Structures are given as structure tokens and as C-alpha cells.
Amino acid sequence: MFALSTKNQWLVGSVLLAAMLITRAHVTDHLLDASWAVFFLAGFYLRNALAFGVFMATAVAIDYVAITKFGVSDFCVSQAYVALVPAYGALYVAGRWFAGQYQGETLATLGKLMLAVVVGFAVSEVISSGSFYAFSGTFADINLQEFAGRLMKYAPHGLYVMSLYLAIATLLHLAISMVNRPLAHGK
């Protein structure tokens, strides 16, 4: 089981919120939205379940400000928007599951990380894209074949973006672990 001190959870939570604010607000087209990775990482690093509510409220607030103050398109805000709660919840739960499976920097842990990422992403993608497809009012002829085609078209990019941010987080996690390891043994 992976667990941070309360102080370090506050630090990590602040960094994750900043990452979501910077990338989700769409103030620059150069940074891809890190929200999916942020929810997974929040599940992994933050023990208090209230963290999910804080991150969800922050995501909604960022979207509201981006749309009303910065002129970002409201295309994705529809009747299906509420499905982001279970979609992001799936990522958060996948991160929590992985925290419980974490056994240090081993190949077994890497395999469990990959499983958590793929399953969390797949469930989240089906919920978010499926609800948008079925309930947004954007698509006139709703059928499973068209939805599957759209899923296959857009999901790889989403998995790429999430994996990119998770790779960066993993490298930071490993680097910090390596720096702290000698300090712990030197006490």
C-alpha cells in the first residue's frame, strides 16, 4: 500500500490542482488537458476520499470560467456533462486500487500500474464518450456501430495524453524515491 504523509499529500494535491488548472483552462493550445491523469494520480496519492469532490468541483469551476470568461467553446457542456462524475470517478478509483497494490519499484508494480491505467481509462472513456454520444443531442442517429467507430477514432489520443502525463509523474515519483532513499537509510 502506498501512503504519503499528510504534509506531502497537501503538496501533491496542490501540484495536481495546478496542473489541472494550467492544462484544463485552455488558455493555451500548446498544453494537452491533464485532467484524466490528474484524477488517476489523485486517487493514487491522496488518501482522503473528499479529494475527489475537491478535484471534481475544481474541474467544473475551471470549465465555467473558461467558457464564460475566456470564450472557450461550450460544445462539450450538455446534458451529458454530469457523466463526468462517474467517468472521473473511475479514474480516481483506478488510482486508489493501484495505491493498494503498490509494492515499490518492481516489475509487478509496473504491470499493475499498466492494468489500472488501461482499465481506468477504458471505463472512463466509455462513460464520458458514451454519455456524450447518447445524451448530448449532437448526434441524430445513435447506434452502437457508429459509437464504436468514434471510440476507436478518439480513444487512442486520449490514452496517449493520459499516458504521457502519467509517464512524467512516474519519472518524478521514481526520482523523488531515489533521492529520499539514501536519506532514509542514513538516519
Image (cartoon, rainbow, N blue to C red):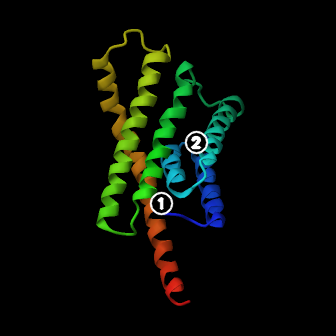
On the image, the x and y values in percent for residue 93 come to: 47, 45
On the image, the x and y values in percent for residue 89 come to: 51, 39
- Residue 60 placement, left or right of 129: right
- Residue furthest bottom as drawn: 186
Q: State the SS at label 1.
A: helix
Residue under numbered circle 1: 169
Q: How far apart in space, not on screen, are marks 2 and 1 (Cα)?
A: 17 Å
- Residue 105 placement, left or right of 90: left
The vertical placement of 90 against 82, above or below, is below
Residue under numbered circle 2: 24
User: What residue is drawn where x is 68% and y is 36%?
Assistant: 61
Camera-nearest label, 2 or 1: 1
On the image, the x and y values in percent for residue 70 come to: 68, 34
User: What residue is drawn where x is 48% and y is 66%?
Assistant: 172
Q: Which three-letter amino acid code belongs to the residue tagged 1? A: Ala
Say how many tags the image has. Answer: 2
Comparing 23 with 38, the one in front is 38
Which corner quadrant of the image does residue 100 belong to?
bottom left
Instruction: Say whether disc 2 or disc 1 marks the residue closer to the N-terminus.
Output: 2
Query: Could you say which disc has been placed on residue 160 in the image?
Result: none
On the image, the x and y values in percent for residue 20 come to: 59, 47
Other residues around mark 1 within 10 Å, as few (<14) / some (14–19) / many (≥20): some
Residue 12 appearing in the image:
yes
Q: State the SS at label 2.
A: helix
Q: Which three-letter amino acid code belongs to the residue tagged 2? A: Arg
User: What residue is drawn where x is 59% and y is 54%?
Assistant: 16
The vertical placement of 135 against 116, above or below, is above
Other residues around mark 2 within 10 Å, as few (<14) / some (14–19) / many (≥20): some
Which corner quadrant of the image does residue 119 belong to?
top left
Residue 30 appearing in the image:
no
- Residue furthest top as drawn: 140
